[in-house]
Image (cartoon, rainbow, N blue to C red):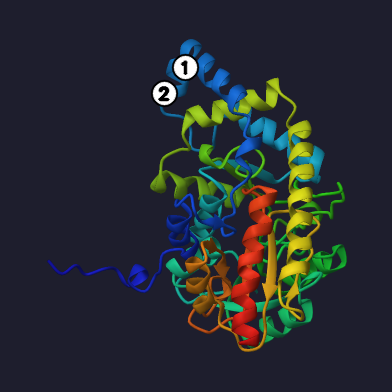
Amino acid sequence: MEYNISNRMSKMRGSAIREIFKYAQDPSIISLAGGNPAPELFPADQLAKIAYDTLKNQPVLALQYGITEGYMPLRDAVKDRLKRVENIGKQDDELIIVSGGQQGIELSTKVLINEGDTIIVEEPSFIGATNAFRSYGAKLVGVPVQDDGMDIDALESAIARHKNVKLIYTIPTFQNPMGVTMSEEKRKRLYEIALKNGILILEDNPYGELTFDGTKVPTIKSFDTHGIVLYSGSFSKILSPGLRLGFLCANSQLIQKIVVAKQVSDVHTAMLPQIMASEYLKQYDLDAAILKMRENYAHKCGTMLNAINEYFPKGVKYTRPGGGLFIWCDLGHGVNTLDLAKSAIEQKVVFVPGNTFMTDMDKPCSALRLNYSTVSDEKIIEGIRRLGTVFDKAING
């Protein structure tokens, strides 16, 4: 039978990262492609105890329907933590628990964007967000990312050139895929420009707690006094991605509409994971767990940077993150990393080609994203060594 796929989905592509994960299932392959947290850091024993106690003592609460806004004790705990850690939570703000940060992005798009509206994104940017925007027929306009975040002069120029700009999407802290952090000065300029032009900001911050040295730049949402910033957060990188828990903080009027949109999507976020997260925050020290994550990722990032310096061809440019999970490399020389990905797989190592993160994914790209969080030091070094061989051949012949 021939199926007539909707216009909205007919040209959509699956995530290249998800496709690469299929190769990563092969134990002989070294994967530097994912964005997964280190599995050895999962609090599995604590969560197992919480799950057992919950199902034994509160089975109806855990297994019955919940309210769309989210499990109240978890919402209260997240609000308290946001206020303490990020200085987020003005009088008119409200919060909803969502099924992972990705759903917060998708629901925001559903509520705010009409087909043909323009969304300004960082170039490169997170494919989960750009695909959500594409699925609602948005026009994507990319703005370059510099060492200190989005090019704000280019942002102003893009707003002047393009009609009907409704939203600016940014990952200002340890950006995915580049790993860079937007300066406080740029964050304030971005906010002022958006306010002046009547544009909303979607601030995505799944990596903000993973700062290697504890240094943090204020979130854009923390100085939002006009309700123009939607703040998307997640438990995926600081507790467990499998729980599928995120949260969205925005002006209460927006959250009311997002609640209705979520009722159409999945009614409510699963109750058992919400209870587990709530009890974990109550019974255990999340700050201490995050400190261990910071130390772990700082070490692995350093290992990868040292290996890149040793094995990659001279002249290759790469970022030096202060936190998060990613390093961005640009090989230059007219190299197309999408082609090199196939050669890398032959050498039993995988990465994510840079075109995946661009507004025009068909355009050749000389950059790539590397991840250091899930593999051992030995595999990081060996994987970079193998990539160095592939890259040297592509650049130097």
List the residue tagged with mark 2: 63
Q: Quarter holding the N terminus? A: bottom left
List the residue tagged with mark 1: 55
Instruction: Tell me which residue sits at (46%, 46%) in the image.
Output: 262
Could one spot residue 206 in this view of the protein?
no
SS state under label 2: helix
Nearer to me, 390 or 93: 390
Give amino acid for label 2. Leu
Nearer the N terminus, badge 1 or badge 2? 1
Instruction: Tell me which residue sits at (48%, 55%) in the image.
Output: 24
Q: Position of residue 22 (x, y in %)?
A: 42, 56
Structural crowding at the residue carrying mark 1, measured as other residues with C-alpha within 10 Å and reported as few (<14), some (14–19) or many (≥20): some
Q: Quarter holding the C terminus? A: bottom right
Give amino acid for label 1. Leu
Nearer to me, 352 or 388: 388
Nearer to me, 97 or 173: 173
SS state under label 1: helix
Quick check: 174 above or below 83? below
Quick check: 342 above or below 362? above
Count of picture labels = 2
The quadrant holding residue 185 is bottom right
Tell me if label 1 and label 2 are in contact, CB under 8 Å.
Answer: yes
Instruction: Tell me which residue sits at (52%, 66%) in the image.
Output: 347
Structural crowding at the residue carrying mark 2, measured as other residues with C-alpha within 10 Å and reported as few (<14), some (14–19) or many (≥20): few
Mark 1 vs mark 2, CA separation in Å: 8 Å
Could one spot residue 141 in this view of the protein?
yes
Q: Position of residue 317 (x, y in %)?
A: 75, 76
